Amino acid sequence: MLFARQQLLLLAEDSDPVINASQRSRTHLQPVAPARILPRKRRSPRRHPYRLMVVEVTANLAVSVVFSGVAIATLVQLLPYHQSQQAKLQEIKAEVQRTDKRVTRLNGEFTRYFDPMQGKSIMQQESQWVEPNQQQPVWLEESAGSGE
């Protein structure tokens, strides 16, 4: 930029004598530093061409870690509830087994009670009924004085 200004001043000094006089006095009052030409910085090839991709993958990984942490915390909180439900399930299974045994026994009794072939024997067992053509045994006690 400075170099371009100096070239313009030199051109202006040569072309217009009125401007030349005023600018000469000004240029002599202010010393002009020699123009340093700075080489234009070349754009160096990117050191991190995948920087955006690295940021995206890192963010994705961070979100995944957060979700995993939340999932693990939730599972830890649900574990006691699950264990209590399993205990209740075991109690219910034991009760079902007891009920199944009772149902099987009662079903057998039901079949027996309503079987026409066993009606007489059931009546004899449940009551003291005896068929008229059947004799009842009578037990006699031996008396101590008879001596036989």
Image (spheres, rainbow, N blue to C red):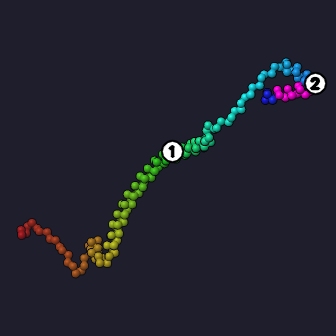
Percent position (x, y) of residue 92?
41, 57
Disc 1 or 2, which lies upstream in sequence? 2
Q: Residue at x 21, y 79 (%)?
A: 134
In depth, the one of 11 and 55 nearer the eye is 11
Percent position (x, y) of residue 48?
61, 38
Q: On the rendered image, what quadrant is the C terminus found in? A: bottom left
The residues colored magenta run: 6-17
Can I make out residue 25 in this image?
A: yes
* Figure check: 65 above or below 130: above
In depth, the one of 21 and 82 nearer the eye is 21
Toward which corner of the image does residue 113 lie, by quadrant?
bottom left
Q: Residue at x 40, y 55 (%)?
A: 90
- Residue 18 — which label? 2
Can I make out residue 59 in this image?
A: no
Residue placed furthest toward the top: 29
Q: Amino acid at mark 2?
A: Val
Residue placed furthest toward the bottom: 133
Q: Is residue 141 left or right of residue 84?
A: left
Percent position (x, y) of residue 19?
91, 25
Residue of label 1: 73
**Which label lies toward us, 1 or 2?**
2
> Is 16 within the magenta?
yes
